[in-house]
Image (spheres, grey):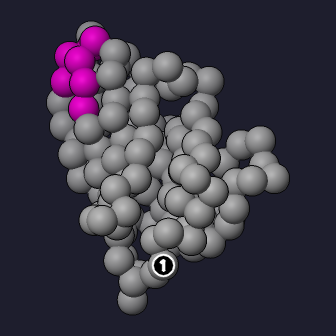
C-alpha cells in the first residue's frame, strides 16, 4: 500500500523557517518523482517544488519560492524534505506531498496535480506578518 505522510507544518513569523517532511512507503522511492503542492483557502492547488529521485535529484521550483525553498531526498529514509526559509504571509497554506513514477528529464516544470498518483494528508503552514 502506497503511503505518504506530510509533517512539519506550524505557525511561524514572517522571515522565519520551517522544514516539511514527506515520509513515504509502498513504492520504489528511487524511481519516482515527489512533488510538494500547496492550497490556500479559496485558491486552487499549486505546485511548489518537485524532485526526480531517478534523475540524479533533478529539481524544479515555482517562481514564488525559488531561492527561498530547498527540496531534498533522503533515500535511506524514503523521505523528501522541503526546507522553507524567509517565509512570507503569502506562503500560508496547507502543504501536500504526492508521488508519481514519471521522469522530469524531458520536462521544464513539475507534473500537474492530476498526474500524481497518491497524496499525503497535508500539513498546515501559517506565516504571520
Residue bounds of the magenta highlight: 12-18
Q: For the point 50% across and 25% down, which residue is it? A: 65
Q: Mark 1 points at which residue?
A: 28
Front residue (pair 66, 30): 30
Q: Is residue 115 visible?
A: yes
Q: Which residue lies furthest to the front in this view?
A: 56
Q: For the point 75% across and 53% down, which residue is it? A: 105
Q: Is residue 10 left or right of residue 85?
A: left
Q: Can residue 5 be seen in this view?
A: no
Question: x, y (%) of residue 83?
Answer: 33, 34
Question: x, y (%) of residue 99?
Answer: 52, 66
Q: Quadrant of the image for the N terminus?
A: bottom left
Question: x, y (%) of residue 60?
Answer: 61, 39
What crowding class fits label 1: few (fewer than 14 Cα within 10 Å), some (14-19), or many (20 or more)?
A: few
Q: Quadrant of the image for the C terminus?
A: top left
Q: For the point 53% across and 59% down, which residue is it? A: 53
Amino acid at each position: 500500500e502506497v503511503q505518504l505522510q506530510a509533517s512539519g507544518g506550524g505557525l511561524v513569523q514572517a522571515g522565519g523557517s520551517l522544514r516539511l517532511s514527506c515520509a513515504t512507503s509502498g513504492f520504489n522511492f528511487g524511481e519516482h518523482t515527489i512533488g510538494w503542492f500547496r492550497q490556500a483557502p479559496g485558491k486552487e492547488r499549486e505546485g511548489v517544488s518537485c524532485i526526480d529521485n531517478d534523475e540524479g535529484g533533478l529539481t524544479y521550483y515555482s517562481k514564488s519560492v525559488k531561492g527561498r525553498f530547498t527540496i531534498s531526498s533522503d533515500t535511506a529514509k524514503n523521505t523528501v524534505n522541503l526546507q522553507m526559509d524567509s517565509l512570507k504571509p503569502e506562503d500560508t497554506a496547507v502543504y501536500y506531498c504526492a508521488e508519481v513514477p514519471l521522469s522530469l528529464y524531458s520536462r521544464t516544470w513539475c507534473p500537474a496535480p492530476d498526474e500524481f498518483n497518491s497524496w499525503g494528508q497535508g500539513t498546515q503552514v501559517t506565516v504571520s506578518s
